[in-house]
Amino acid sequence: MNARSRRRLWAVLGALGAVVVGVAGVALGRAAWVGAPNPSENPVRTAVNATSVAEHLAGAIRFQTVASRESAGEGATFGGLREYLRHAYPLVHDRLGCERVGESSLLYRWTGTNETLAPVVLMAHLDVVPVLPGTESSWTHPPFSGAIEGGFVYGRGALDDKSAVVAILEAAEELLGHDHRPLRTIYLAFGGDEEVGGARGARKMARLFRSRGVPEPAMILDEGGALVEGMIPGVEGSFAVVGIAEKGYLSLDLSARGPGGHSSAPVTPTQIGRLSRALARLEESQFPARIDGATLEMLRAIAPVQPYGRRIALANVWLFRPFLVRRFLADPRMATLVRTTTAPTIFHSGTTENVLPEEARAVVNFQILPGDTIQGVVERVRTIIADAAVTARPLPGGSVRSEPSPVSDVDGPAFASVAKSIRQASPGKAPVVVPFLTGPTDSRHWSAEGARNIFRFRPFPYEQDWMARAHGSNERISVQGLADGVGFYMQLIRNSDRL
């Protein structure tokens, strides 16, 4: 190599070195200036009778309001719960009224002093999932007993979602008792069929608003997030995770149909074999992963509380994106935050051991990442299967499907009001408020009608095994946590005046 070539090489290496140093400087600088994890907030202590609130929830649990796809469940149980709430919260029912929507959903209207302002909608649902037959013995207390023991209220709906119904009504009753009147109108919207898709409840209420010309809500709050401990490995303290977007929902019916016959002379491919290969292709060809939207906002929020080494990566997603994606995909619970998930859930075929069935059917469920669409999922599935003998169509029979929601603005006044209320109502050190991506909720029906400022949060502390409890055995909620949640809703209603 001559002297001129060496000079060129050193010039190139010097330029590359300068780029590396520059990139490193930017990355380290961003990590050092990610900001504080929480603005300071003066806590507001609200006297709430925890015993009374717990007893009200226990009473609500005793109504077995299990909805089904065939019927939203109106009858003795839902009607009984409606009358129970009427007696438990007389001021709410006297001053707000109670409109029955559909078969079993309830809508309350708390008229504001300035009816020209966009309203606030506080959502929850009255229905619960069933208790699986044969699992009753695994409960510490009977699932619909509403037992109170050891500082907890037990029973189906304690977490999902009668606790929110009761806490919202308690907050309204308490404020009405002090002659509070909000500046903007507050709606309390309680669906009766969320667990089976919300078509008869939340969907009807959202469309009812549109038909009545009600302005787009300034804020909608539904279930989806909670107060959690240990959500982030290696980081101590509590977090308030607030959903700012939710995934779409789609179930596809896959079927293969063709010749059957006797098992002694099988003709290949059999319909079971054909459909099995199609499912295997889908599992092997997962949707591509990406970090954007709600998940990107989550990383920005947790960066300040991370050790410096991790903070470098989280504060510089533009640089460390491939590394972060791999970390997400290593854990199925985290992978759902960065891609549309593919889950075969049902397989049907054959009735006799020596007969080849003429048809095989399967159901595959997809939870769709914002940015993807139902149409795109269907097209991709058909491309991956690449078999004209296998049909893929949306599951018939009333299965609800929904597009992913838009991502709500974390820099706007609605999110700020939710975060402020969380910090004000916290009994101890205020939790770090973290935006994140949730699964489908009733609020998807409001999103479909054009609502934008939708947030998903329950102000209750959830135990580490809450997901297993919510739809499983020994569902329960802390008595004190329930009472603190009432304080949150009171603050949120007060703070709504300044949206």
Image (cartoon, rainbow, N blue to C red):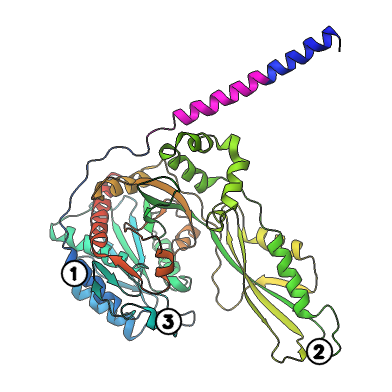
* Amino acid type of the residue tagged 3 in the rendering: Thr
Position in image of residue 388 (x %, y %): 80, 70
Which residue sits at x=78%, y=75%? 274
Position in image of residue 471 (x %, y %): 43, 72
Dividing the picture into quadrants, the one containing residue 272 is bottom right
Labels 2 and 1 touching (C-beta < 8 A): no
Quadrant location of the C terminus in the rendered image: top left
Between 96 and 441, the one nearer to me in the picture: 441
Q: Is residue 389 left or right of residue 365?
A: right
Q: Check disc 3: other Cα within 10 Å, few if <14, some if 14-19, many if 20+.
A: few
Does 356 sit above or below residue 434?
below
* Amino acid type of the residue tagged 2 in the rendering: Ser
* Amino acid type of the residue tagged 1 in the rendering: Asp
The kind of secondary structure element at disc 1 is helix
For residue 135, the mark is 3
Position in image of residue 130 (x %, y %): 42, 79
Quadrant location of the N terminus in the rendered image: top right
Labels 2, 1: front one = 2
> What are the residue bounds of the magenta stretch?
17-36
Residue at label 2? 263
Indicate whether residue 30 is drawn in magenta: yes
Residue at label 1? 94
